[in-house]
Each structure stands twice: as C-alpha cells, then as structure tokens.
Image (cartoon, rainbow, N blue to C red):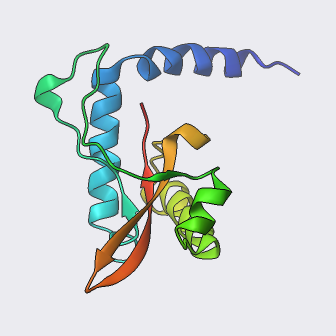
Amino acid sequence: FSLSWAVEEFERNIVLEMDFKQESLNCSKIRGMFLSDKRLHSKIIVPEVHSQFCTDKVIVMDYIQGIPLHDNQKMLEAGVDCRNIASIFVDAFGAMFFDYGFIHCDPHPGNLLVSTEYENGRPVDKLVILDH
C-alpha cells in the first residue's frame, strides 16, 4: 500500500494554498456560488475580496463582524440559534461538496463566524466563511 499519491497531491496543493492571489480567486469564486444559490444566499456571508490590493502574500477582503463559531458563551448571550447555525454549516459544506464540486474553506474556528444581521427589524443569524 503506497501513499505517494497523497504526498504528491499535498505538494501540488500546498503551493497554491500559500499563494494569496490564488486564494483570493478561490474566495471570489465560492462567494459567487453562494450568492447565486437560491437556498443558501441569505444564510451565508463570504467577504468580498478587493483584488486590486491583493498580492501573492496579502489578501484584502471586507471586514465582517461576528462571533467565533467556537465561542458558545457569546453565541448564547447573543441569542444565536445554534441548531440553525449547525444546519447552515452542514448545508454549506454539503453544497460545496455535492452541488458545486468546489470546496473553499479551511473549516477551523478562526475561519468561521456567526453574524447576526437585522432584516425587517428581526435578528437573522448567518454563517460567515473566511479563508485566509
């Protein structure tokens, strides 16, 4: 049993992961996919990338205020519906895997936030997906 294929795959992709110009293109691509998804566009925020300021070492995107997904206490204090956010998370990653065929996110706590926005005077929790 050989794992040389995995080493080759890692070697090929790690270079792309460290190129922020490429990352900014991937971020913009997944943002567009979520924005055009009738089921998810109102539940997910992917910050807009400002490519004119990006280099292979710097990525510039909108700042999105949110609660880190791992901060249960703050989410409870803010009245976040954690079951709803968990459902959005599963739907988002399911869509990337099964519908889009394109996965862009490193799903660790630093890259996932919950943002509470107000629409028609009511709070609406949204999942913020970052990758930087």
Residue at the image point whose x is 73% and y is 15% from the top: 4
- The answer to whether residue 90 of the structure is visible from this angle is no
- The answer to whether residue 82 of the structure is visible from this angle is yes
Task: State the image coordinates of residue 35 (x, y, percent, origin top left).
Answer: 28, 63
Camera-nearest residue between 42 and 102: 42
Farthest residue, direction front = 77
Is 24 placed left or right of 127 in the picture?
left
Is 115 placed left or right of 121 in the picture?
right
* Quarter location, residue 85: bottom right
Residue at the image point whose x is 29% and y is 32% from the top: 24
Residue at the image point whose x is 25% and y is 37% from the top: 61
Task: State the image coordinates of residue 117 (x, y, percent, origin top left).
Answer: 34, 69
Task: State the image coordinates of residue 71 (x, y, percent, origin top left).
Answer: 63, 51
Farthest residue, direction left = 52
Query: Relative to residue 87, is residue 58 depicted above or below?
Result: above
Task: State the image coordinates of residue 14 (x, y, percent, origin top left).
Answer: 52, 17
Camera-nearest residue between 27 and 42: 42
Residue at the image point whose x is 42% and y is 30% from the top: 132
In which quadrant will I find the N terminus? top right
Query: Relative to residue 89, is residue 57 depicted above or below?
Result: above
Farthest residue, direction right = 1
* Quarter location, residue 122: bottom left
Camera-nearest residue between 87 and 8: 87
**Count of numbered tags:** 0
* Quarter location, residue 128: bottom left
Camera-nearest residue between 60 and 75: 75
Is 73 placed left or right of 111 in the picture?
right
